[in-house]
Amino acid sequence: MTIRVMLVDDQVLLRTGFRMVLAAQPDMEVVAEAGDGVEALQVLRGSAVDVVLMDVRMPKLDGVETTRRICQEDDPPKVLILTTFDLDEYAFSGLKAGASGFMLKDVPPGELLAAIRAVHSGDAVVAPSTTRRLLDRFAPMLPSGAGKEPRHKELERLTDREREVMVLVAQGLSNGEIAARLVLSEATVKTHVGRILTKLGLRDRVQVVVLAYETGLVRAGGHG
């Protein structure tokens, strides 16, 4: 199945570069492009798109607000935010707005392609090390007080094991790392993650991370 990709960036040269990389892939096709958020929303109305590569800083409408509006639509495409700076202050806002992940614009082509495929398949793309650094910086800015007892009714639906898995997801561990930590099979961890998403009404691992910090389940510094 071909992954239909939309490029949203105000720099034509960057879009051209991305288009060349994606065009060489047998399972990807660039079906739409836009130079700003307003144009992106207009183009999307008439295009069938699976994954949007979204720039953050753009004229007229920035990538965060554009992502929010896209993700409010019925059956929206997945959004992968591309940012120039590691730990860009917009990255966390983008994830909260509904993006399935973010990457640096200078990421090696192979990693970008893997990220597009992962997002398309339903996985979130935030490298564990980046998750840790991002949340260590931004968790203190979240509305709830870090370090308090978790006060989110939905969390009570989780079993002890599911809560344990959620803490490790929020710390940025992959399924394989969680499996090793808890002495479980990777398939079992994946099942636990799936149940967490279902019980809490979350879309992907990114939302698990955000909720864990917002509720105080995990504190800044990565400790549950």
Image (cartoon, helix red, strand yellow):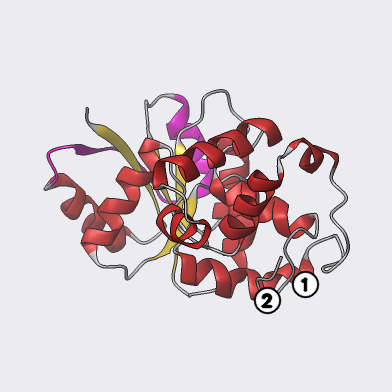
Please state which of the two labelled residues, at mark 2 or mark 1, is closer to the viewer.
2
The residue labelled by disc 1 is: 140
Q: Depth check: 220 or 98 in front? A: 220
Q: Residue at x 59, y 53 (%)?
A: 95
Q: What residue type is disc 1 on?
A: Pro
Location of mark 2 (residue): 221
Quarter of the picture containing the N terminus is top left
The reply, left or right, for residue 199 in relation to residue 214 is left
Point out residue 215 in the picture as x, y percentages from the top left corner.
Answer: 80, 54
Q: Is residue 212 visible?
A: yes
Q: Residues within 10 Å of mark 2 (few under 14, many from 20)?
A: some
Residue 83 drawn at (x, y percent): 46, 65
Q: CA distance from mark 2 to mark 1?
A: 10 Å
- Callout 1: SS: helix
Per the rendering, the mark at residue 5 is none
Q: Judge whether residue 88 can be spotted in this image.
A: no
Q: Earlier in the sequence, mark 2 or mark 1?
A: 1
Q: Which residues are magenta?
A: 25-45
Asked if residue 103 is among those painted magenta in the image, a careful observer would answer no
